[in-house]
């Protein structure tokens, strides 16, 4: 009779229908059911929300997919029975825009499958505000969802979690904008980091934390202080309710280290700090967190010639310095390293009094003079006008060379300006003061040609005095070019036919070397009639010689 009864029950089972079964065994991975068939039905454990809620002997409904598989066992599903029962219920109770709770079942291409009573599709773009990269974190989780679309023909439902989040954020944002005010402290999460700052999520409202408001100290990039996802406390600095924008501050949540700065670092105080940055014009030194001072490159040494701070310092060095000044409003402190030592220029007047004879090495040449190193860090300058009594020097290279040792006389000392004026010509007496004892009109002199110009030849005479042989005074014959007759280095004889003490010039004549007194007087008178434009000064001649 039992076999006949079982046979009759088996014949009543219809594939695709919902049937009842009695739980006979609960295992870790499956639940065994008696459905009145030839064999027991097996339901995978994952189809149940909680196996602990089931009991042996309990009757449940399952969906009969097939009466027999290859092994003769029935194929049943608790999940599909629930979905089949729920589908009609969903259609009557749910419509597009409804909000339902559901549990994420599995991943599929393009999103997730969520059980809301029936299987619904959650596109990846609708999971969160930012589409997540890892969908595994949502598996097994229960959330509220909004129904976007129902397709009754295909029994397909599309849902969204993102729309609910955005609606919630919008409501929170409106509420926050009404509540917050400058000075409030709020907790938020770092949402995004850029070169100029970070966006902080204040639970529905994004605020901008600019890089300048992150720290009282120096930072090069926001990532030095923050990372995405980190939670921080920030201060509300400014609220623009019309544009729904909020400016935030992180450093404002701590005490401003510049308050009372003049008491902690008074002028002339010795301080210690760490070099945190080097720039062409100086070194920034951190005195404490949020407080930096600048040592200008000129304040690094009294005596060393430092072109850039990297020559003597490197980032990370611990150094001592003296406070020169504080600009509290601009948050600037001026420091000096050289002020730690006595200023050697304070002793310059004592060491190099005016009139003293000194000796030094030519360190540098400029267009206006030569710098002579008297000791390390102490230079004197010989101006071109103080290099020779007898000639106009157009460039110091005409008289000295770099690296050469020279003697000079101290002419002036400016300790405040750190300048010493030197003279080379002052080592000897000015020969022009006694020119009458050296040369007279009509004197027959000898000398060496040292410059050739288009106007004539420049001849070096005794006492280092130069004379000019004008082109008209070279020969009785007309001469087109001086260099056709004379060359540098030639020894010549000539007569002095003009002495101009004011202009410091001597005029010579080669052709008058053999003249008698009457001829010489006539030549002198003729020479005096030469125009200023033709008879140039010594400096003009040298300029011309340089151009030639």
Image: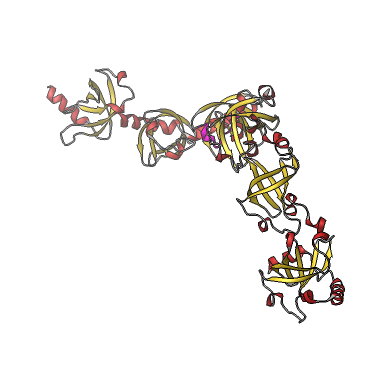
Residue 67 location, quadrant: top left
Q: Is residue 411 above or below residue 137?
A: below
Q: Is residue 68 left or right of residue 61?
A: left
Residue 224 drawn in magenta: yes
Residue 64 drawn in magenta: no
Residue 175 in percent (x, y) is at: 61, 27
Residue 244 in percent (x, y) is at: 63, 35
Residue 19 appears in the rendering = yes
Q: Looking at this view, is 3 or 305 the one in front?
A: 305
Q: Looking at this view, is 160 or 147 the one in front?
A: 160
Secondary structure mostly taken by the magenta-highlighted segment of the chain? loop
Specify start and end residues of the magenta stretch as a single range.
215-226
Q: Is residue 488 above or below residue 277?
A: below
Q: Is residue 250 left or right of residue 79?
A: right
Quadrant placement of the N terminus: top left
User: In this figure, what is the number of numbered marks?
Assistant: 0
Residue 210 appears in the rendering = no
Q: Is residue 48 left or right of residue 68?
A: right
Residue 484 location, quadrant: bottom right
Q: Looking at this view, is 534 or 495 the one in front?
A: 495
Q: Is residue 128 above or below residue 505?
A: above
Q: What residue is drawn where x is 42% and y is 34%?
A: 91
Residue 184 in percent (x, y) is at: 63, 24
């Amino acid at each position: 009779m039992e076999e006949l009864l079982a046979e009759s029950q088996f014949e009543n089972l219809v594939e695709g229908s919902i049937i009842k079964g009695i739980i006979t065994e609960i295992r870790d991975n499956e639940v065994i059911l008696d459905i009145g068939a030839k064999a027991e039905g097996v339901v995978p454990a994952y189809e149940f929300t909680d196996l602990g809620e089931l009991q042996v002997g309990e009757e449940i409904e399952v969906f009969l997919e097939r009466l027999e598989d290859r092994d003769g066992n029935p194929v049943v599903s608790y999940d599909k029975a629930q979905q089949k029962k729920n589908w009609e219920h969903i259609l009557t109770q749910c419509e597009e825009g409804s909000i339902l709770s559901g549990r994420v079942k599995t991943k599929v291409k393009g999103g997730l499958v969520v059980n809301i009573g029936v299987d619904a599709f959650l596109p990846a773009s609708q999971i969160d505000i930012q589409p997540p990269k890892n969908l595994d974190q949502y598996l097994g989780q229960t959330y509220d969802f909004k129904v976007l679309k129902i397709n009754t023909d295909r029994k397909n439902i599309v849902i969204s979690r993102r729309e609910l989040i955005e609606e919630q954020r919008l409501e929170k944002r409106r509420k926050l904008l009404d509540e917050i005010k400058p000075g409030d402290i709020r907790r938020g999460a770092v949402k995004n980091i850029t070169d100029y700052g970070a966006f902080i999520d204040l639970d529905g409202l994004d605020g901008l934390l600019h890089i300048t408001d992150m720290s009282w100290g120096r930072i090069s990039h926001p990532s030095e202080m923050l990372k995405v996802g980190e939670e921080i406390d920030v201060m509300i600095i400014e609220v623009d309710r019309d544009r729904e924008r909020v400016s935030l501050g992180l450093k404002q949540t701590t005490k401003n280290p510049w308050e009372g700065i003049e008491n902690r670092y008074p002028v002339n105080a010795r301080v210690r700090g760490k070099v945190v940055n080097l720039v062409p014009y100086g070194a920034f030194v951190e005195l404490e967190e949020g407080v930096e001072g600048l040592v200008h490159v000129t304040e690094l040494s009294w005596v060393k010639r430092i072109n850039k701070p990297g020559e003597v310092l490197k980032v990370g060095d611990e150094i001592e310095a003296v406070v020169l000044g504080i600009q509290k409003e601009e948050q600037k402190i001026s420091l000096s390293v050289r002020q730690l030592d006595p200023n050697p220029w304070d002793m310059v007047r004592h060491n190099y009094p005016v009139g003293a004879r000194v000796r030094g090495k030519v360190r540098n040449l400029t267009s206006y003079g030569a710098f002579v190193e008297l000791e390390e860090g102490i230079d004197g300058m010989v101006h071109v006008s103080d290099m020779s009594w007898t000639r106009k020097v157009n460039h110091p290279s005409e008289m000295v060379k770099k690296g050469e040792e020279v003697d000079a006389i101290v002419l002036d000392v400016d300790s405040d300006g750190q300048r010493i004026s030197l003279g080379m010509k002052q080592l000897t007496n000015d020969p022009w003061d006694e020119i009458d004892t050296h040369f007279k009109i009509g004197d027959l002199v000898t000398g060496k040609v040292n410059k050739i110009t288009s106007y004539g030849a420049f001849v070096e005479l005794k006492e280092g005095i130069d004379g000019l042989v004008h082109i008209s005074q070279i020969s009785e014959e007309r001469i087109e070019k001086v260099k056709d007759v004379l060359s540098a280095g030639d020894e010549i004889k000539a007569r002095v036919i003009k002495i101009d003490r004011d202009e410091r010039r001597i005029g010579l004549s080669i052709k008058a070397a053999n003249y008698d007194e009457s001829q010489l007087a006539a030549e002198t008178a003729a020479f005096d009639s030469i125009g200023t434009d033709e008879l140039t000064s010594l400096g003009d001649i040298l300029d011309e010689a340089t151009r030639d």
